[in-house]
Amino acid sequence: MRQVVARAMADPATVLRQLGEPKRGGIEPLHCSPELTIINVLWPAGQVIMPHNHAMWAVIGVYTGREDNIVWRRLPDDINGRIEAAGAKTLGTKDVLSLGADAIHSVVNPLSRRRGTSRLDRETHGPRSGPGGQHRICGASRAPSENVGEAGHCG
């Protein structure tokens, strides 16, 4: 899947032409099935998403703008499940990032303009699943102006 996203992000002008310039923050489902979810995440300027775990693998591709990711790890033997920063990764236009099902990250849009990413997910029928194992985002219509962080920790 990473290769598929990388091919799409290699031509960001075409992706931008197809999806449009991000005008408001929000999440747009592009494809929803029990096997695969593809969403377009439109990040408002300065948006910060706190550390979260997608509970499924994800491939993120940036077609416009930039995002700063902090990767976190759980502290070993910590009964409270605390985490600590373990690394950082900045993604710009054309960049692709793969996250494993257990990856924990936080995201910031450091720019003064909106940015857009496309994300592929493999739903694992976990707590974020909707009917038939479908990603929760696909089962609900989200207004583009809603806070991205409220969408089931989509980061």
Image (tube, helix red, strand yellow):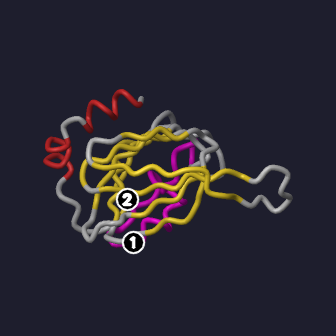
In the rendered structure, find residue 27 and report the number of the disc placed on it. 2
In the rendered structure, find residue 51 and report the number of the disc placed on it. none
Mark 2 and mark 1 in contact (Cβ < 8 Å)?
yes
Left or right? Give the position of 127 relative to 63. right
Q: Nearer the viewer, residue 9 or 56?
A: 9
Q: Position of residue 114 (x, y in %)?
A: 27, 65
Task: Determine the residue positioned at 44% across, 51% down.
Answer: 138
Q: Position of residue 38 (x, y in %)?
A: 39, 43
Alpha-carbon neighbours of circle 1 within 10 Å: few (<14), some, or many (≥20)? few
Q: Residue 96 appears in which quarter of the rendering?
A: top left
Left or right? Give the position of 110 relative to 12. right
Q: Amino acid at mark 2?
A: Ile
Give how far apart the Cα atoms at labels 1 and 2 are.
8 Å
Where the N terminus falls, by quadrant? top left
Task: Determine the residue positioned at 18% across, 49% down.
Answer: 16
| Residue 108 seen in this snapshot | yes
Query: Where does the magenta region start and end?
Result: 131-155
Task: Determine the residue positioned at 36% across, 49% down.
Answer: 91
Residue 86 colored in magenta in the image: no
Q: Which residue is mark 1?
A: 146
Q: Nearer the viewer, residue 131 or 82?
A: 82
What secondary structure is the stretch in magenta mostly built from? loop
Q: Is residue 30 above or below residue 10?
A: below
Q: Position of residue 147 (x, y in %)?
A: 42, 71
Q: Helix, strand, or loop for circle 1?
A: loop
Q: Residue 60 appears in which quarter of the rendering?
A: top left
Residue 132 colored in magenta in the image: yes
Alpha-carbon neighbours of circle 2 within 10 Å: few (<14), some, or many (≥20)? many
**Lower sequence index among marks 1 and 2:** 2
Q: Position of residue 43 (x, y in %)?
A: 34, 63
